[in-house]
Image (spheres, rainbow, N blue to C red):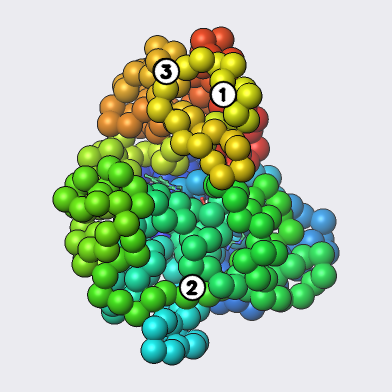
């Protein structure tokens, strides 16, 4: 099993947080502390609070944009590992996973064991403990479908508690944990079906690639392999040699607007109506039609040559340049369509 920060430490300036982010960007940390067990992680957060020191929890660094001046407080690198079955019945298992466990190792393990429910989330970088933070999702699955509890240290109550899915307030790329430093996620419980077949395929592009219909089930390994292939073609699987993957994945979320706003826009764009009357518009379509194609350049950064939504560091970029490019795109989309784009990653020591 590989470490959650991969081999980035050999490719970035010494002492910089760039070594711990998939963008390979970010200045130095005030203090860098590694926790390989829960007690150390909780104690680090507790002590920093009593000393009045801000703490940044960092796991795989695949969903953060850290400023060029870094983070002056304490950076807690979460490197806890392990998973175990804590409950089972004829049809399902509940798997308790340490926050620092590499997410894709977990998906591979589940597929191998014949446990279904997260196979379409194959290839997503980062840690298991970060998946509840933005309710990680792809290809028709999101972790809110399988999480039954999040065990977190609550800084406000100075206590560890098991939070129910309702308390997690999962929504599209969001939860109670995102943009909050109240909780340190220690372990996550996933309920997975015992089944050789995938959960019903919901995503049209994936169904097409599988030669299946939406709603069909396919063998778990076939679902995983097909998702990995689709993702690789878009630069969405980490590859140190491919700078199209030096990103945070999608930089922008898909804008969600009301039906009235959608009708007023009169756009000939693909869109997904929600159950609550909202309409989700693909950010990639807006960006492309506002004139920002794949490979669109900034200073040492660019839109990925494989995917319009990924902003990438070409090796000589900076966070300042990346955010300049992001603002240019946001302003262009706003001017062309009157729709506001919002960043998906968490911004640390920098502003959008
Ligand atoms: C190539 C690529 C493809 C991607 N594809 C997808 C995708 O398809 N779908 C998707 O949803 N995301 C995707 N992402 C984004 C990212 O991989 C996920 O959001 C992932 O869950 C982040 O995990 P991490 O361990 O790297 O988190 P980090 O980047 O280390 O942290 C992200 C945020 O979570 C907080 N955090 C992390 N761990 C904890 C914890 N244990 N307790 C409390 N707070 C914590 C951090 O403080 C930070 O605010 C992609 C990223 C890349 C680079």
How far from the left and from the top, in percent, is residue 253? 52, 36
Whole-Å distance between the Cαs marked 3 and 1?
11 Å
The residue shown at (63%, 24%) is 260
How far from the left and from the top, in percent, is residue 134? 56, 51
The residue shown at (56%, 72%) is 148
- Of the numbered discs 2 and 3, the one sitting upstream in the chain is 2
Residue 258, picture quadrant: top right
2 or 3: mark nearer the eye: 3
The residue to which callout 2 is attached is: 190
How far from the left and from the top, in percent, is residue 246? 37, 39
SS at mark 2 in the image: strand
2 or 1: mark nearer the eye: 1
Packing grade of label 1 (10 A; few <14, some 14-19, many >=20) is some
203 shown above or below 306: below
The residue shown at (53%, 75%) is 189
Assign the C terminus to one quadrant of the image.
top right
The residue to which callout 1 is attached is: 262
SS at mark 3 in the image: loop
**Residue 177 visible in the snapshot:** no
- Of the numbered discs 2 and 1, the one sitting upstream in the chain is 2
Residue 184 left/right relative to 300: right
Packing grade of label 3 (10 A; few <14, some 14-19, many >=20) is few
The residue shown at (34%, 18%) is 293
Packing grade of label 2 (10 A; few <14, some 14-19, many >=20) is many
- Of the numbered discs 3 and 1, the one sitting upstream in the chain is 1
Residue 199, picture quadrant: bottom left
The residue to which callout 3 is attached is: 268
How far from the left and from the top, in percent, is residue 214? 30, 51
265 shown above or below 204: above
**Front position in the image: 270 or 294:** 270
């Amino acid at each position: 099993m590989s470490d959650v920060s991969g081999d980035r430490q050999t490719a970035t300036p010494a002492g910089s947080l760039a070594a711990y982010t998939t963008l390979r960007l970010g200045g130095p940390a005030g203090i860098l502390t590694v926790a390989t067990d829960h007690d150390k992680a909780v104690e680090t957060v507790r002590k920093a609070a009593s000393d009045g020191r801000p703490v940044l929890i960092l796991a795989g660094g695949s969903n953060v944009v850290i400023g060029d001046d870094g983070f002056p407080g304490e950076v807690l690198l979460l490197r806890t590992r392990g998973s175990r079955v804590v409950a089972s019945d004829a049809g399902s298992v509940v798997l308790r996973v340490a926050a620092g466990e590499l997410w894709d190792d977990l998906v591979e393990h589940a597929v191998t064991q014949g446990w279904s429910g997260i196979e379409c989330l194959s290839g997503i970088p980062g840690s298991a403990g970060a998946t509840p933070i933005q309710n990680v999702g792809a290809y028709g699955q999101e972790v809110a479908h399988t999480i039954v509890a999040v065990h977190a240290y609550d800084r406000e109550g100075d206590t560890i508690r098991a939070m129910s899915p309702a308390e997690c307030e999962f929504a599209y790329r969001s939860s109670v944990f995102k943009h909050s430093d109240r909780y340190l996620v220690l372990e996550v419980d996933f309920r997975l079906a015992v089944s050789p077949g995938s959960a019903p395929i919901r995503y049209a592009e994936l169904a097409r690639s599988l030669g299946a219909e939406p709603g069909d089930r396919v063998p778990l390994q076939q679902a995983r392999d097909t998702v990995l292939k689709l993702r690789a073609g878009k630069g969405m699987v980490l590859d140190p040699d491919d700078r199209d993957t030096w990103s945070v994945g999608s930089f922008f979320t898909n804008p969600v607007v009301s039906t009235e706003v959608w009708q007023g826009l009169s756009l000939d764009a693909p869109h997904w109506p929600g159950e609550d009357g909202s309409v989700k518009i693909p950010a990639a379509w807006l960006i492309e039609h506002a004139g920002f194609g794949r490979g669109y350049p900034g200073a040492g950064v660019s839109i990925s040559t494989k995917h319009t939504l990924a902003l990438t560091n070409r090796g000589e970029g900076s966070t300042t340049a990346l955010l300049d490019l992001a603002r240019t795109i946001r302003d262009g989309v706003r001017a062309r369509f009157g729709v506001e784009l919002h960043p998906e990653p968490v911004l640390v020591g920098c502003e959008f």
